[in-house]
Amino acid sequence: MRAVITFIIAAILISGCTNMRRLEKGKPIRSEGSGGIIRKHLATLAQPNWAAMRLQVESDVNGERSAFKVNARMRCDSALWLSITPALGVEAARLLLTPDSVLFYSKVPGNRFAYRGNFEAIDSLLGTEINFEMIQRILLGQGIGLFDEDNKYISKVDGREHLLIGKYKRRVKRLVGIKERAISPGDSLKVEATEAVQERVLNRSDDEDLLVKRYWFDGLGYQLTQTRFDDLFWGRSIEIKHGAFEIEAGGWIPHVTDIVISSPEATHKIRLEISRAKYERPYPMPFEIPQDTELRNGL
């Protein structure tokens, strides 16, 4: 296994040198097959067991703008603990996520309440489906759904980046009127079919059938720089951009992440910026809801 990793890292360095020379000459990077790009990307990933991060968060959700600090503690694949502090410096809320549960406690005077439930409350707030694995992957700069076994990709070059576009079913082409190979990197896919065609396709499909996935990777280091999902079934999209990568926990972790969630009803924007991080030390995740706290059905 170590020999395989060493080989992949060597391949990344060789490819990076070649592409650097091409960029210096004003040329685009060399195109590569999707399998090679994914293997090289895998070698860049940090995979800590424990992580503690201090985050600065800016959000615009449902037209309400806010900025706050978050202390995050994560046991990978198990639990994520968040302590939320606004500008005044007093903890306002605490959140504990597991793969199948959400616990939230608001400490705001005049609005103290708790929520015990699942991720449907977060889905309702953001207007899209989200789960524990997705949040973990966003924090660590890992591709959501990238490694699904049934995925096949078309590889293209977008300036200094590699772009992988998930191959989609014929019914998607009927809706958008374009094949995967003809998609330009910056295209925002929209339904172009007549209402009659739309109705027939939607009646014969589920949401996974009509999801178009795109992933961008740095042409020199193979870090994941951008992910875009166009959900034609529900008419919404998610765009995730990563930057300011630093070597931590044996790989590259983005210290700035921008998320844009768009739907016919609204557009939500979230920026995450890591100011400090530590790894591989177990941290406590204290979470207690006082007995007299009001329990609500949503956030």
Image (spheres, rainbow, N blue to C red):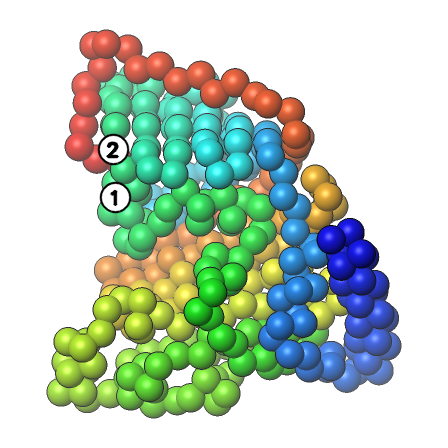
Can residue 86 be seen?
A: no
> Residue 248's quadrant in the figure?
top right
Image position, residue 51 (x, y; %): 60, 32
Marks 2 and 1 close (CB-CB < 8 Å):
yes
> Residue 154's quadrant in the figure?
bottom right
Q: Is residue 192 left or right of residue 157?
A: left
Task: Give the numbered dot on residue 117.
Answer: 2
* Marks 2/1: CA–CA distance: 8 Å
Image position, residue 104 (x, y; %): 32, 27
Q: Residue at x 58, y 46 (%)?
A: 140
* Nearer the observer, 26 or 217: 217
Q: Residue at x 39, y 18 (%)?
A: 287
Image position, residue 272 (x, y; %): 53, 44
Can residue 207 be seen?
A: yes
Q: Residue at x 69, y 82 (%)?
A: 31
Q: What's the residue type where badge 1 is placed?
A: Glu
Residue annotated with mark 1: 120
* Nearer the observer, 112 or 105: 105
Image position, residue 11 (x, y; %): 80, 67
Up-down relation of residue 75 to residue 199 (above or below) = above
